[in-house]
């Protein structure tokens, strides 16, 4: 229902993870019998969690570790892994930079040219461990880089930008044809990022196999503050999932919806699936892993932009191994560890035997759900903060 926000101007209400809750029904399921796997094209992923294509999260070693646990990690072909032969030295410089100089250091580091031979090398290193290799680039380099990646054995190619639109206008350069890129490849293409029913429906017409949903919700992203754009993730995911369902009924081709960013706890992940996601993409939550290259630091993809940085470096700390974060056992009670275990128990409690059934559970608007009755928890947190 639209609301008037001024004379002749309407706006609809949109919802984020903290404003909704999931409703149990008349069935529960044995958690051991819940199926959490999901598909992208012909690739089946045991754990429906993708590690973001951010340099503080994913390097070759992390991608291998993620793959061996049953998940998927995306390596950024625009990042330090393809600009430097020894990226560990560069990460050290980023981590040790003082806060007031961090952005300028990022801009200096990312001025180094991308070395195309490193694209193939990194993919081959991941594939040598016999795990899936997923990589990403921005649209203007996607046509060339995707062919190099496919030749090197990549399983998935991600075309990622702050805003992905099915159409683009410019009189100064030729538009990137996303449909042609999808057609030229034999591997699945994921396109992002987008929000909204109409835009996602048109993007599905390109022939992609997945859409990343979310503009600006990430912990290290400042797009919403800098540009003022974005839609809260529950509403964004629902809108795009409805487009997916319509497109599937019309064509018989299923395009996966991947909620990207904004999830702090396992409860948020559960709400993303209930909103219609087939998979989720996480950055800061996995940057806390001991295996993450950022050593407890995380930074946005647009942080190094030379004209208008739209990301920042944040310290998330190193809290656990990747296995503990994904599969447990959890050593904390805040929902940041054993993410898959929490998803499994949530699905079981809601009577959802698989991800498709999880997408159908009832959602209620509940802005006080996290604070209701939690007076002693709040008092304890205040006491700990003194």
Image: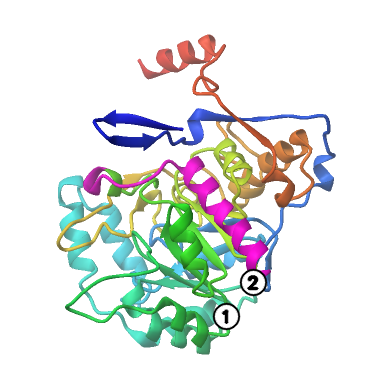
User: Marks 2 and 1: CB-CB under 8 Å?
Assistant: yes
Q: Is residue 1 above or below residue 183?
A: above
Query: What is the secondary structure assignment of the residue under circle 1?
Result: loop
**Residue 279 visible (yes or no):** yes
Q: Is residue 348 above or below residue 53?
A: above
The residue labelled by disc 2 is 41
Q: Is residue 10 above or below residue 53?
A: above
Query: What is the secondary structure assignment of the residue under circle 2?
Result: loop
Is 255 included in the stretch rendered in magenta?
A: no
Image side of residue 93 versus residue 30, left or right: left
Q: Position of residue 201 (x, y in %)?
A: 50, 62
Q: Residue at x 46, y 10 (%)?
A: 379
Q: Residue at x 51, y 48 (%)?
A: 239
Q: How many marks are shown on the rendered structure?
A: 2
Between the residue at mark 2 and the residue at mark 1, the CA separation in whole angstroms equals: 8 Å
- Neighbor class of circle 2 (other Cα within 10 Å; few <14, some 14-19, many 20+) is some
Q: Position of residue 298 (x, y in %)?
A: 37, 51
Numbered range of the magenta stretch: 225-252
The residue labelled by disc 1 is 187
**Residue 263 visible (yes or no):** no
- Neighbor class of circle 1 (other Cα within 10 Å; few <14, some 14-19, many 20+) is many
């Amino acid at each position: 229902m639209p609301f008037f926000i001024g004379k002749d101007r309407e706006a609809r209400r949109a919802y984020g993870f903290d404003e909704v809750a999931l409703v149990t029904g008349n069935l529960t399921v044995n958690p051991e019998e819940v199926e959490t796997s999901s598909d992208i094209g012909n690739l089946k992923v045991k754990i429906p969690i993708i590690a973001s294509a951010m340099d503080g999260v994913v390097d070759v070693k992390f991608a291998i570790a993620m793959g061996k646990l049953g998940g998927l990690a995306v390596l950024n072909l625009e990042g330090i892994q393809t600009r430097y032969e020894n990226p560990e030295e560069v990460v050290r410089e980023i981590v040790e930079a003082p806060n007031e100089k961090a952005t300028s250091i990022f801009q200096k580091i990312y001025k180094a040219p991308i070395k195309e031979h490193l694209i193939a090398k990194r993919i081959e290193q991941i594939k040598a461990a016999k795990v899936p290799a997923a990589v990403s680039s921005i649209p203007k380099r996607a046509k060339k880089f995707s062919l190099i990646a496919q030749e090197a054995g990549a399983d998935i190619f991600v075309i990622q930008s702050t805003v992905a639109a099915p159409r683009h206008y410019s009189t100064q350069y030729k538009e990137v044809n996303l449909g042609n890129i999808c057609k030229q490849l034999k591997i699945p293409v994921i396109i992002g990022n987008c929000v909204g029913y109409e835009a996602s429906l048109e993007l599905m017409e390109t022939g992609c196999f997945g859409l990343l949903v979310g503009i600006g919700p990430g912990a290290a992203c400042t797009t919403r503050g800098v540009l003022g754009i974005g839609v809260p993730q529950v509403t964004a995911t629902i809108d795009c999932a409805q487009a997916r369902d319509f497109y599937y009924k019309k064509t018989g081709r299923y395009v996966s919806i991947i909620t990207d960013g904004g999830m702090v706890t396992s409860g948020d992940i559960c709400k993303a699936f209930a909103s219609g996601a087939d998979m989720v993409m996480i950055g800061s939550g996995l940057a806390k892993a001991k295996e993450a290259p950022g050593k407890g630091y995380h930074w946005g993809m647009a942080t190094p932009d030379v004209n208008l940085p739209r990301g920042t470096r944040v310290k998330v700390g190193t809290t656990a191994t990747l296995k503990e974060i994904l599969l447990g056992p959890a050593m904390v009670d805040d929902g940041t560890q054993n993410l898959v275990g929490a998803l499994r128990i949530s699905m079981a409690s809601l009577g959802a035997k698989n991800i498709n059934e999880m997408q159908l559970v009832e959602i209620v608007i509940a802005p006080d759900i996290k604070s209701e009755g939690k007076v002693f928890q709040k008092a304890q947190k205040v006491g700990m903060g003194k």
